[in-house]
Amino acid sequence: MMTKSNLSQTFKKTFDTTDTPRTFFAPGRINLIGEHTDYNGGHVLPASISFGTYALGQKRSDQKLRFYSMNFPNMGVIECDLSNLDYTKEDGWANYPKGMLLYLQKSGYEFSYGADILFYGNIPNSAGLSSSASIEMATGVLLEGLFDLKIDRVHMVQLGQKVENEYIGVNSGIMDQFAIGMGKKDHAILLNCQTLNYEYAPLELKGYVIQIINTNKQRTLAGSKYNERRQQCDQAIIDLQTKLSITSLGDLTKAEFDQHKHLIKDVTNQKRAKHAVYENARTLEALEKLRESDLKGFGKCMNESHLSLKQDYEVTGMELDTIVQAAWDQEGVLGARMTGAGFGGCAIAIVDKDKIEDFKKNVNAIYYKAIGYDATFYTATIGDGAKEVTEGVLK
Ligand code: GLA
């Protein structure tokens, strides 16, 4: 098991120091429902999980920055200077912390000294659990702590998204950074992505647990297809705006959409927009179910969400569809759906605690037979958002 002291020792060895660094953590996230709604001005219902990114750091007395990731040991220590934080392809993963520093500088935070920073992440790779937003937010809280800054948390979240969009070049919405920056133990967050108003909803699952199921299909095409979906929704809005005064698909009720959908010229774009509008309504409905402790109703919303992502948004694919169908067919399952961007990555299912072992065995057997390799199962623990770590044993 990894402990804070293991990480601390690696830090000291890597950076040749005897001083004990401070340790920070930013989680990954799952999204319970509200998929591909964030950049459409709708609602999402994510939660932060106990997998995440640890960041250990120490201030330096010069202007240098040194980064090391235990996940990319072959890349060694990556160095740069506070005065030049431009994106550099060769710096690979270190562009995430560099970007955070640059965007904090740009918004007026001053760093008079550099730092040594070590990262260790235990989020499964390319699983759609937001490892990139996690490293951004881990950097944010670390810098805030080391340099004694007061950074409004929602502002830090927005900077993380900016880094992703402008510096890294991935056109993602605000959900991941928000879930990771604002997460709360045993709670989901309902976020209105248009206004950034949010509320916490207790996740009281009684005898059930959330299973994360990794298809182990990496999301290779996700980037380009993701941007294509965004463009299709943007075009749908332009078409709708010929008659309606709306700014995003999140402004429409299902009835309003049905009444005006003919304005969207392209039939594919019509399907994409339908998903965005219906999924937004479904997310609010799911929250109601959760508040009424109607887990069955909540599960039904999850199932409908998956079908809509499969049929109308077309972001699931064989692996996710196989795993979700296999989950639906098991005893003790209240609901299952893909989570995150799609095209591979993870699904989630709400499963009766007592049926977990059978669930894993059966789902994996079906998956293996159809796809040819195993899925991986984790029980989700919903933890707090990004913060300094005080306990010694890490999760
Ligand atoms: C990715 C993006 C998010 C969101 C989801 C889909 O995780 O980073 O902003 O759009 O896909 O819901």
Image: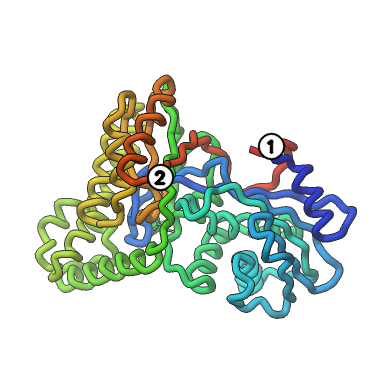
Three-letter amino acid code at the position of disc 2:
Tyr
From the image, tell me which residue sits under label 2.
373
- Identify which residue, 229 or 258, lies in the foreground: 229
Label 2 environment density (alpha carbons within 10 Å; few <14, some 14–19, many ≥20): some
> At 55% across and 48% down in the image, what residue appears?
123
Where residue 14 sits in the image (x, y, percent)?
80, 58
Q: Secondary structure at mark 2?
A: loop
- Does residue 370 appear left or right of residue 113 in this picture? left
Q: Is residue 243 visible?
A: yes
**Residue 288 visible at all:** no
Q: Is residue 199 above or below residue 167?
A: above
Which of the 4 image quadrants contains residue 115? Answer: bottom right
Closest to the camera, between mark 1 and mark 2, is: 2
Residue at image position (33%, 41%) is 323
The circle on residue 1 is 1
- Could you say where residue 290 lies in the image, as x and y percent from the top left? 36, 33
- Image: 328 above or below 98: above
Apparent side of residue 28 relative to residue 350 in the rendered image (left or right): right
285 sits to left or right of 19: left
Q: Name the residue type under label 1.
A: Met
- Figure quadrant, ligand 1: bottom left
Q: Quadrant of the N terminus?
A: top right
Q: Nearer the viewer, residue 356 or 84?
A: 356
